[in-house]
Image (cartoon, rainbow, N blue to C red):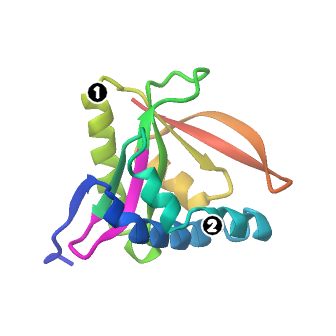
């Protein structure tokens, strides 16, 4: 892997197919058995290539982790949308293809996004994760995230807890 050319760059319309693949593979790996099956399938079907093509040109920043052969991960972020938490910035989504998880690429993408947010004056950064997604929770705790909130949300009729991690 040391010969890979790794870059983190803003997504463009040509990344739509890769973003769709990353989203589907990462969500299946992360949420199968957590989000009810039919609901998960509906969520996956909505985020097709066409959806991603239109998303890259919208407001919130979207960056991809590119290893020279296209996107293998992405992050969406911007101003914190929840005024009830003590954060200026928020990472909405950070996902990698499963085969690229656990080897440092996620940390690299996370740090790049945090650096961009801080460059724009957003020093306190929030990330939400489903509490049952133990891998994600361990990832954010390992990066120094402080658990500051827990809320319950209904997804597909099932009550699922979300945990907020704050990075200062």
Rendering coords of residue 90 (x, y %): 46, 36
Q: Which residues are magenta?
A: 66-76
Q: Main secondary structure of the magenta part?
A: strand
**N-terminal of the two: label 1 or label 2?**
2
Q: CA distance from mark 1 to mark 2?
A: 32 Å
- Circle count: 2
- Residue 162, disc: none
Asked which secondary structure carries label 1, the reply is: loop
| Nearest to the observer: residue 163 or residue 146 | 163
Rendering coords of residue 122 (x, y %): 36, 26
Rendering coords of residue 117 (x, y %): 33, 33
In the image, is residue 106 part of the stretch drawn in magenta? no
In the image, is residue 69 part of the stretch drawn in magenta? yes
Asked which secondary structure carries label 2, the reply is: helix
- Residue shown at 77%/41% (left/top)? 152
Q: Is residue 92 left or right of residue 164?
A: left
- Residue shown at 61%/21% (left/top)? 84
Q: Which residue is mark 1?
A: 120
| Nearest to the observer: residue 132 or residue 73 | 73
| Nearest to the observer: residue 50 or residue 37 | 50
Q: Which residue is mark 2?
A: 44
């Amino acid at each position: 892997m040391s010969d890979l050319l790794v870059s983190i760059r803003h997504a463009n319309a040509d990344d739509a197919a890769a973003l769709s693949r990353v989203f589907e593979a990462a969500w299946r790996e992360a949420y199968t058995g957590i989000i009810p099956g039919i609901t998960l399938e509906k969520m996956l079907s909505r985020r097709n290539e066409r959806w991603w093509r239109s998303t890259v040109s919208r407001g919130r920043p979207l960056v991809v982790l590119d290893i020279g052969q296209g996107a293998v991960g992405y992050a969406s972020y911007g101003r914190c949308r929840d005024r009830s938490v003590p954060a200026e910035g928020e990472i909405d989504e950070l996902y990698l293809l499963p085969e690229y998880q656990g080897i440092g690429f996620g940390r690299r993408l996370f740090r790049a996004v945090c650096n961009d947010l801080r460059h724009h004056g957003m020093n306190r950064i929030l990330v939400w994760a489903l509490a049952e997604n133990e891998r994600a929770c361990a990832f954010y705790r390992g990066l120094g995230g402080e658990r500051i909130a827990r809320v319950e949300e209904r997804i597909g009729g099932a009550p699922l807890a979300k945990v907020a991690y704050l990075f200062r």
